[in-house]
Amino acid sequence: MNRMKLALRLLGREARSGELTLLMLALLIAVTALTAASLFADRLERAMTAQTAEFLAADLVIQSPGPIPAEWLAEARRLGLKEARTTEFSSMLIENDEMLLASIKAVDAAYPLRGFLKTADAEHRTETVVTHGPEIGAAWVERRILSALKLKFGDVLTIGEKKLRITQILTYEPDQQGGFFSFSPRVMINAADLEATKVIQPGSHVHRFFQFSGDSKALSAFRRFVKPQLNPSQRLLDVHEDRPELGSALTRAEQFLGLSSIVVVIIAGAAISMAARRYSERHFDASALLGCFGCTQGEILRLYCLQFAILGLAIGALGCGFGWLFQEGLFLLLRPLLPASLAQQPGILAVLFGAGAGLIILFGFALPPILRLKRVPPLRILRHELEPLPSSAWLVYGLALTLVCALVWRYTGDARMTAVVAVVTIAALLLLALVIWAMLSATRKLLPRLPLSWRFGWRGLLREPRASIAQILAFGVTLAAILSSLMVRNELLDTWRQQLPDNAPNHFALNIFPDQLAAFKQSLQAKGIESSPFYPIVRGRLTHINQTPVQRIAVKGSQGDNATHRELSLTWSRELPEENTIAAGEWWNRDAPGLVSVERKLADSLGIEVGDRLTFSSGGRQFEATVANFRALRWESMKPNFYMIFSPGTLEDFPSTLMTSFYLPEAKKSALNALAKEFPGMSILEVERILRQLQTLFTQLTEAVNYLFYLALSAALTVLFASVYGTLDQRIHESALLRTFGASRGFLRKMQSIEFFCLGAISGVIGVLIAESLNFALYRQVMHIPFQLHRDLWLTVPLLNAVIVWLSGLWGLRRVVRRPPLRSLREL
């Protein structure tokens, strides 16, 4: 109790005297930034999760060709989950002597569980948002069906043997799965009318979707219950695997949120470490006095640790409040762009994250300097030149870095990203420390040849090489964190913009027969339509990997398991598709039959290596191919993408059709019906709605990424200035001594300018080097974005950083230059 009173009394006195101002400021900024980023990311992630659930019209979906067991439905009801059912199949519609292959979707009364539908009247003047499907006896159709079958609003449409009245124009549905049944012209009917159509017969190709929604814990329990019981024809749908164009964008956005948290953690750790170092150096005399009064080293350490714990809790609570207000303001600014289902309040773990992270960083990075205080000899009271013995703090720093890495991993959920950042950063710091030490040592011989002001300015860096190296690395790490965040942000946004240009393909043409290719190209050219390359398609299934049945290798429910339980679209090409990049191996430069290129994520899921032998089955025939390379795909490009691409000469003997994609503006939509009549066997898949969904999602993610970067940048710049100010005590003392010996104010300003400018320039080069190394590892190993060296940064960033550090240093020393030297010396 007495120790607590003493700690509070000392803490209050030091707070009033300004001794803790710098440390409190650094900690407050760190906790505020971490809390705001944590709350923002938590709410945004939960909002995006809710929005992506709308893409499936539910939280969890089971796809099955037939009914699912009654036990599954009973378990869902026991867990309190809501359920809905939809059935999709293709059917030929015949009206007014016109034929059209359409996708029929039968929905029950509970559909949709998530999201909404949009319908329009006959004139299509306004859209109406509805949360239910058609009534019994009614049909909702897409407008293209009316023009293709020469029907009008209110006419009767016959599906099989059932006549249904067209009562609405369907303009939007949330759960287009991305397959053939979803992109064909849609007719939506009530599930109660399905049996009367008599279209579905034994052997019919039907997709049934059983949709569930409810509490996240109940959904997780239901998933664990169902997953082991799925048969090969059943699947659990997930937005990351079944909607790769959305899943890729969300994954990269989540990775950037994780990178932003890493940036703030690194900057906060560097700032608090420097602030704690300044604090400990200013308390050497106080520690010596406590030793003279009989305090043991353990008691002195516990006293300071208690003060820091109280300080951390108080500043942590205040920082949490500021962080809460910051993210609330941020969401108010972004409200028009964020999902309508935005989470109202963040989770409790996100609220506590900033305060907990602040305490971990405070003790992790402040403890090594504080350990020196217990080693201050009492004799320092008489001999002020005595310094405490350096503490062996490597173990403590190692523990701190381990805790920070664990914290970052817990926050990002990405162990690979955390490992890449930690390994690259530590290796770069050790290497650069040796380089800086060698450079500083080599320049000692040049000092006598330099002008006087340059000699004194450069000597400031050489006087204590270890302190100079630590300071340069601290500035370099802070700058590298900012640059890395900026570079990844720019690459991320550029990638999204490139993925969805204004003329992104919004239609796919399938089942084009080879003898129709010339006529189809000519028809597109006559209508002013430009298409992507034509790809031959052979339907086939992967059966064996190195003579081992693929079912023994694929993990149930994985991407590989899903891909091997259905036929894949196989193609061949001499050239690497434009949107693909080689991730491993080499592309073939000539006709070399028997080679195959595999999509990288599918290869990882199935454990395929370059050089493996894969066996495929197509049309009752089997053939083998050797894996030549892996490809990284951009699913978001909305151009034809393939899991497997074969070398020329491998598949030419198999029956094939052709496919392509093209962009068609709204004004030319009538050309679709002309193409369908000219090529009746061809199928046109319209993906306009998917593009609109992607564009909306990318707009939201872009704004969120921008504001997260601004948050990290503002915190980094403020902490950078605090770090600069935290190293000024020794320079203040030296400047006062020089003034005492007759140095002019102009000489001091010039000397300080040279020292800070050189410090900023060197740390700028170091920062760019670390950032480029870190981003090379991140781009290649984690985010799979092509890496390019940023040559423009190597000159501009060191120069800009030198100016910032120079101005910050002069600002901190401005009063010392103006005041009498005796006054400066007395305040130390």
Image: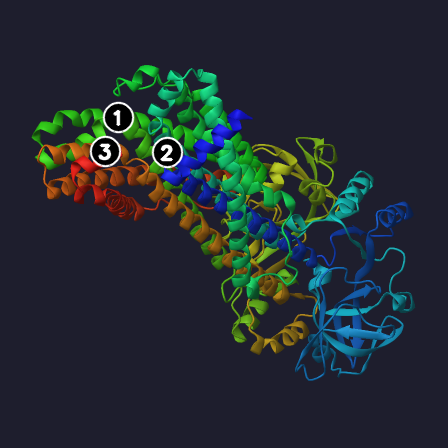
Give the labeled residue for mark 1: 465
The disc labelled 2 sits on which kind of residue?
Met
Determine the CA span between mark 1 and mark 2. 16 Å
Residue 559 in percent (x, y) is at 67, 43
496 to 601, vertically: above or below: below
Residue 345 in percent (x, y) is at 64, 53
Is the residue marked by circle 2 packed among few (<14), some (14-19), or many (20+) residues within 10 Å?
many
196 to 459, vertically: above or below: below
Nearer the observer: mark 3 or 1; the answer is: 3
Q: Residue 274 carries which label?
A: 2
The reply, left or right, for residue 749 in relation to residue 563 is left
The disc labelled 1 sits on which kind of residue?
Pro
Is the residue marked by circle 1 packed among few (<14), some (14-19), or many (20+) residues within 10 Å?
some
Between residue 589 and residue 635, name the one nearer to us.
635
The reply, left or right, for residue 287 in relation to residue 665 is left
Q: Residue 826 carries which label?
A: 3
Q: Which mark is residue 431?
A: none
Which one is earlier in the sequence, the residue at label 1 or at label 2? Answer: 2
Residue 395 in percent (x, y) is at 46, 20
Query: Residue drawn at (56%, 55%), measured in percent from left and top?
Result: 636
The disc labelled 3 sits on which kind of residue?
Arg
Which one is earlier in the sequence, the residue at label 3 or at label 2? Answer: 2
Residue 677 in percent (x, y) is at 68, 74
Determine the CA span between mark 3 and mark 1. 27 Å
Query: Residue drawn at (69%, 64%), measured in percent from left and top?
Result: 183
Q: Quadrant of the C terminus?
A: top left
Q: Name the quadrant containing residue 615.
A: top right
Between residue 794 and residue 243, name the one nearer to us.
794
Q: Name the quadrant containing residue 762.
A: top left
